[in-house]
Amino acid sequence: MDKFLVRGGNPLKGKIEIGGAKNSALPCLAATLLTPETVTLHNVPYVKDLITQRRLLEDLGATVLTPELRTHKVTARNVEVFEAPYHLVKTMRASVLALGPLLGRFGQAKVSLPGGCAIGTRPIDLHLKAFEQLGATVSLESGDVVARAPKGRLVGSAIDFEKVTVTGTENVMMAAVLATGKTIIKNAAEERSDGTARSHPFRAGRPWRVILRRSTEISAPIWRSAISVWSRERMGSCTTVVPSA
């Protein structure tokens, strides 16, 4: 088994550069699908999953430029394909994050069931139930998740996750920002990467507001996180820095 052997006794000094967290960068890249305007992301780590996510955006029709190391400029103005292909999704579970923004902005999305998870099988049924609560019709067709908003746009709703899901929280938040009305997500995840999703896509196009607040139920002895999302019809451009883990 590999190990680190650290010999102390000397004061530490100097400067190091902390790279961005993969799990923060992935939802940020997915969120660029929400707007036709250019989104600039700095401090994007150079790892395989981020390369795959970039390929996915390009397959959907987005333009992804890297003017300098760890900087991505994404313009999703000419997205004409609403399907995340299996050959990409099978290698990275986070590809399912394309569902929320595609469904929210275009009213339709098709994504192969995700793979690429070393932890084991983690179903996305909580995502799909939440999309249905936002007014979408969801079906499984030959191993693909097909979701459509019957009237072309989702409708805000109150969603209470049965259990905490980080990717599910991120996916539903991205779908909700372009839905009509207000969406409240209860039992939402509060991990750092989820907090990044709150701070990034909803900064684009003020006055977007995502309010993190605490709520509790009389029958529940513990505090539960709730996120309220007020939506508008269009999002603007954004520049942000992907935080470290």
Image (cartoon, rainbow, N blue to C red):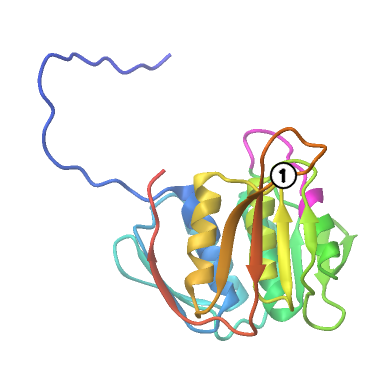
Residue located 79% across and 61% down the image: 158
Residue located 64% across and 57% down the image: 227
Q: Position of residue 34 (x, y in %)?
A: 59, 75
Q: Nearer the viewer, residue 157 or 75?
A: 157
Left or right of 36 on screen, residue 99: right
Left or right of 225 on screen, residue 142: right
Image quarter of residue 230: bottom right
Which contiguous range is marked in magenta? 117-127
84 above or below 123?
below
Image label count:
1
Residue located 61% across and 50% down the image: 92
In the picture of the structure, the residue carrying the numbered disc 1 is 216
Q: Nearer the viewer, residue 115 or 133?
A: 133
Is residue 88 visible to us here? no
Q: Nearer the viewer, residue 205 or 97?
A: 205
Q: Position of residue 103 (x, y in %)?
A: 73, 72
117 above or below 226?
above
Neighbour class for label 1 at 10 Å: few (<14), some, many (≥20)? Answer: some
Question: Magenta span: helix, strand or loop, mainly?
Answer: loop
- The extreme front residue here reads 218
Is residue 158 visible to us here? yes
Residue located 69% across and 69% down the image: 176
- The quarter of the picture where the C terminus appears is top left
Q: Secondary structure at mark 1?
A: loop
Residue 119 within the magenta-colored segment of the rendering: yes
Residue 233 within the magenta-colored segment of the rendering: no
Amino acid beneath label 1 = Thr
Q: Nearer the viewer, residue 141 or 215?
A: 215
- The quarter of the picture where the N terminus appears is top left
Q: Position of residue 33 (x, y in %)?
A: 58, 73
